[in-house]
Image (tube, helix red, strand yellow):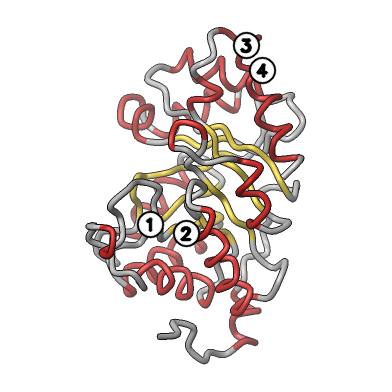
Amino acid sequence: MDVVKPFDKAKTERRREMKKLITQQKSVIPACDVMDLGKLEQIVMATSGVPGIGGYKVGLELVIQFGLPVVVERIRGHSQLPIIFDHQKGGTDIPELGQKFARVAKFSRADAVILFPFGGAATEREWIKACREEDLVVLVGGHMTQKEFLSNEGGFIAELGPEQIYAIAAENGVSNFVVPGNKAEFVLKYRHLLEKILGQGNFTLYAPGFIVQGGNISETGKVAGENWHAIVGSAIYKAEGVDNMRKAALEVTSQIAGG
């Protein structure tokens, strides 16, 4: 079954996001999955000057404790690189909540948000629309990195579900997509799907799932295309001290440069 249905290409072109989140074609985005603001600041101080660092991703550990505005402010004290808010998982609730979510993210001065719209097509469309109306760059994911995710693996998500999510996002102007970096065969599959809809070079992939979850940055880089960014967490933040975090960041950015 082909999930790519006929649609108005001209309309899709008009809807496509014009705001580019990261100017580099390839970069590493530290996932700041730490529990305190001091550690967050260490990560940013260690990495913000490293060539190949493209931005920062923040999620539940910091945001639930301190609030997104505070987290963004701490990062902004050391870097002007883009900040991506990963609600873990945004886009799973009713369509009407998208507007509230988008307003909070915009008020907090985040640059972009990650949505994994498992709540259905109506929710996906409305949350994308709400976020774009607040001038937020939208990253849409449909396939997660853990085992037993798809129904044929013992999970709950239909095999065609991720493809449908990516297709709807692309048709609603999204050009940034989150794919599972530790599942290279799916990265290639979704890249080909998006090339059918948007054309080669007209979208960017973002991939978590490296190091601890088994993904290899260089190997994923071979199938992800020219525009892609590796989201890397513990390989950087588990290094002790600013100097060691910087060394770790230099190591992972060298891998994406060679991918």
Q: Which residue is mark 2?
A: 140
Q: How many marks?
A: 4
Tell me: 43 left or right of 161: right
Between 105 and 213, which is closer to the camera in this rendering?
Answer: 213
As measured in the structure, the alpha-carbon distance from the residue carrying label 4 to the one carrying label 1 is: 31 Å
| Label 1 close to label 2 by CB (< 8 Å) | yes
Instruction: Decide: is 198 above or below 222.
Output: below
Element at label 2: strand
List x then y, in percent, for residue 104: 39, 46
| Label 2 close to label 3 by CB (< 8 Å) | no
Comes first in the chain, label 1 or label 3: 1
Comes first in the chain, label 4 or label 1: 1
As measured in the structure, the alpha-carbon distance from the residue carrying label 1 to the one carrying label 3 is: 33 Å
**Residue under the point 53% across and 9% down:** 240
Comes first in the chain, label 2 or label 3: 2
- The kind of residue tagged 3 is Asn
Comes first in the chain, label 4 or label 2: 2
> Nearer the observer, disc 4 or disc 2?
4
Q: Which residue is mark 3?
A: 244
**Residue under the point 76% across and 40% down:** 257
Q: Which residue is mark 4?
A: 246
Between 211 and 86, which is closer to the camera in this rendering?
Answer: 211
User: Residue 116, labelled with which disc?
Assistant: 1
- The kind of residue tagged 1 is Phe
As measured in the structure, the alpha-carbon distance from the residue carrying label 4 to the one carrying label 2 is: 29 Å
